[in-house]
Amino acid sequence: QVQLVESGGGLVQAGGSLRLSCAASGRTFSDYHMGWFRQAPGKEREFVTAISRSGSSTSYVDSVKGRFTISRDNAKNTVYLQMNSLKPEDTAVYSCAARRGYYSGYDVGATYNYWGRGTQVTVSS
């Protein structure tokens, strides 16, 4: 079992920044690829970004490229999501997730084995 706990969400004005953290416990963190997904009210869950076990590979949905940065610290069992130039359309509950196996398939939520409960991000215009 892997337990994931997100933090760092909140209310920010458009153009502002937030840094989300996801702390993992229970198993060897470096065995897992990590991803961030988001879900806005009335919408389906959407892939945001992912990072490989070692941190050598990262992937982003087009809408956040150049604004969001994913990183991880395997010594601290934590993955981060730095969000800059936030837009109202970034408003959602952001959840981190962990998966084993190949890195490919990183954008498919069903391939992830463990999920956090999420943290709310609200961007006001």
Image: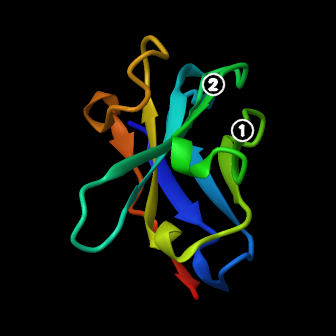
Does residue 60 appear left or right of residue 15 in this picture?
left
**Viewer-closest of 120 and 24:** 120
Please report the residue visible at 72 percent of the width from the left and 67 percent of the height from the top: 85
Extreme top residue here? 102
* Quadrant of the image containing the C terminus: bottom right
Assign a secondary structure to mark 2.
Answer: helix
Instruction: Tell me the kind of residue under disc 1.
Output: Arg
Answer few, some or many: residues within 10 Å of disc 1's Cα (few below 14, many 20 plus, some between 14 and 19): many
Q: Position of residue 32 (x, y in %)?
A: 52, 26
> How far is the residue under mark 1 from the one under mark 2?
9 Å
Q: Which residue is mark 2?
A: 30
Residue 4 percent location from the top left of the image: 48, 50
Classify residue 29 by image quadrant.
Answer: top right
Q: Which mark identifies residue 29?
A: none
The location of residue 106, given as percent across then percent down, is: 44, 27
The reply to whether residue 120 is visible in this rendering is no
Q: Amino acid at mark 2?
A: Ser
In the image, taking residue 39 as reference, residue 122 lies left or right, namely right
Q: Earlier in the sequence, mark 1 or mark 2?
A: 2
Q: For mark 2, does the 10 Å Cα neighbourhood hold few (<14), some (14 to 19), or many (20 or more) residues?
A: some
Say if 9 sits above or below 84 in the image.
Answer: below
Viewer-proximal residue among 63 and 122:
63
Whether pointer 1 and pointer 2 mark residues with C-beta atoms closer than 8 Å, the reply is no
Can residue 49 be seen by looking at this rendering? yes
Of 32 and 60, nearer the camera is 60
**Helix, strand or loop for disc 1:** strand
The image position of residue 34, as x and y in percent, is: 53, 35
User: Residue at label 1?
Assistant: 72
User: Is 91 above or below relative to 66?
Assistant: below
| Res 71 → quadrant | top right
Q: Where's the N terminus, which quadrant?
A: top left
